[in-house]
Image (cartoon, grey):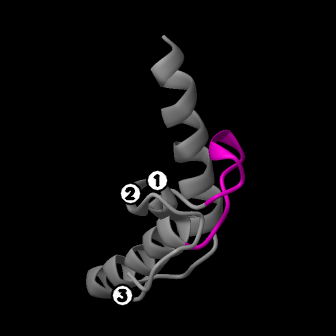
Amino acid sequence: MPDNVFIESFNGKFRNEGLNAHWFLTPDDARSKMEEWRKDYNTVRPHSAIGNKPPISLMNGSSAASAF
């Protein structure tokens, strides 16, 4: 059950910051905007659960995000 907490948190952020924050003109426009949100979410914004670092820092073994 603990995994459900993490996915529910992600789903809420995705809906509020991604889906509800944009108007989509076409399916391609939606894909493009959601890809930009995904990149920001994974490479730029800090996550409190991992020490206020972006997830990419775990992959790189550093605290700085790379140009993804």
* Residue at (63% x, 65% y) in the render: 17
Residue furthest left as drawn? 28
Q: Report which quarter residue 63 is drawn in.
A: bottom right
Name the magenta segment's main secondary structure. loop
Do labels 2 and 1 touch, CB within 8 Å?
yes
Residue furthest front as drawn? 61
**64 and 12: which is toward the camera:** 64
Which mark is first along the chain, 1 or 3? 3
Q: Quadrant of the C terminus?
A: bottom left
Q: Amino acid at mark 3?
A: Asp
Q: Which of the labelled discs sits on residue 29, or is there none? A: 3
Q: CA distance from mark 3 to mark 2?
A: 29 Å
- x%, y% of residue 24? 45, 82
* Residue at (62% x, 44% y) in the render: 50
- Above or below: residue 18 compared with residue 14: below
Q: Is residue 2 left or right of residue 30?
A: right
**Pointer 2 local density, CA inside 10 Å: few below 14, some 14–19, many at least 20:** few
**18 and 62: which is toward the camera:** 62
Q: Secondary structure at mark 2?
A: helix
- What residue sits right under mark 1 in the picture? 58
- x%, y% of residue 35? 38, 76
- What residue sits right under mark 2 in the picture? 59
Residue segment shown in magenta:
44-53
